[in-house]
Image (cartoon, rainbow, N blue to C red):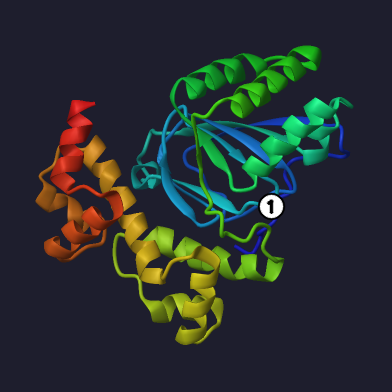
Amino acid sequence: MKASLLVDAPILDKRQLWIKKIEKPHFDHDFHFHKTCELLWIVEGRGTFIAGDHIGKFEQDDLFMLGTGLPHIFRSSKEYHAPDSNLRTVAIAIYFTDEFLSGMSDSAAFMAEAGDLIRRAERGFRLTGETRRQMVDIFSRACTLEGMGLMAGFLSMMHTALQSDEYQPMASAAYKIRPPKREMDRFVDVYDYILKNFHGSITLSKAASICGMSENAFCRFFKSRTQRTLTQFVNEIRISHACSLLREQNEPLKNIYRQCGYNNAVFFHRSFKRITGLTPRQYLENCHAS
């Protein structure tokens, strides 16, 4: 649980590109970061992810770019962890260093574009719309190639991502990139505690004890790193899960809120409206209309 720096990509120098296929019943990495950039394609699976101070949902064919040092975790939905589950998660990641990308050409224009993309990736971003469809198509072909074919596909994806405005930044502009290892270690267990227990009770005292801090010190520390209070953070996780349940399950609204850790329907509705801008019923109607 203390492995904050993940070094499973054997990049031995600045001129290397590495592809990894992840195929397992569910994602099981802890909150971590890499010494490389990561382009991640979710081939199969769905769940919750955190990138820096951003909380969101992922699903099939989502495509993310995560910059060097950006802490992140992808946690598969609850049904993927069931002992009798036949579900699986599949993802393909391309790892590369900042120096590898910027060093592919001596052209001033190329290096400027590479620098722009690297800066955008510092906060992480996900591709959307037609750009995502194009990227997935290029990715699916490129990852079966080697040599110049792979390099051509990689550059095509980088160019497509850079030229498009169909992307969503993830970590906030205020988020401190590349936190010290000591701070990362403190968050590994507390994030895991929240993600495993948000369906039930999350307490400040437990979270503070996990970090080895007093409650007041933990509150200041957590707010400075996430731009949120613990309560706000947990509510965002819970409402994100509620949105997933509303999209995927044909259940009455009164059954949804208890699966998300709420004991009070009024508080659930207030939290949902504050975070999404919609009531649960409005959100459900929008899902059916799309």
Kindly identify the amino acid type of the residue bearing the numbered disc 1.
Answer: Gly
| Residue 163 placement (x, y as % from top left) | 61, 25
Quadrant of the image occupied by residue 283? top left
Would residue 266 be found to the left or right of residue 87 on screen?
Answer: left
Which one is in front, 134 or 257?
A: 134
Give the quarter of the figure containing the N terminus. bottom right
Name the side, left or right, on which 137 lies relative to 254: right
- Residue nearer the viewer, 178 or 142: 178
**Is there any visible trace of residue 207 in the rendered image?**
yes
Q: Quadrant of residue 41?
A: top right
The residue lying at 65 percent from left, 57 percent from top is 177
User: Dividing the image into 4 quarters, which one contains the C terminus?
Assistant: top left
Q: Number of callouts in the render?
A: 1
Q: Position of residue 259 (x, y in %)?
A: 23, 54
Would you identify the image quadrant in which residue 84 lies? top left
* Label 1 secondary element: loop
Q: Residue at x 19, y 60 (%)?
A: 270
Q: What residue did someone put label 1 on? A: 69
| 48 sits left or right of 3 in the view | left
Residue 51 in the image: above or below residue 194: above
Residue at position x 47%, y 38% from top? 25
Mark 1 Cα shell of 10 Å, populated few (<14), some (14-19), many (≥20):
many
Query: With respect to residue 242, does 204 lie above or below?
Result: below
Query: Can you say whether 221 is above or below 55 in the image?
Result: below
Q: Position of residue 93 (x, y in %)?
A: 63, 33
Q: Nearer the viewer, residue 39 or 75?
A: 39
Q: Which residue occupies 67% across, 63% down?
A: 179
Q: Is residue 198 visible?
A: no
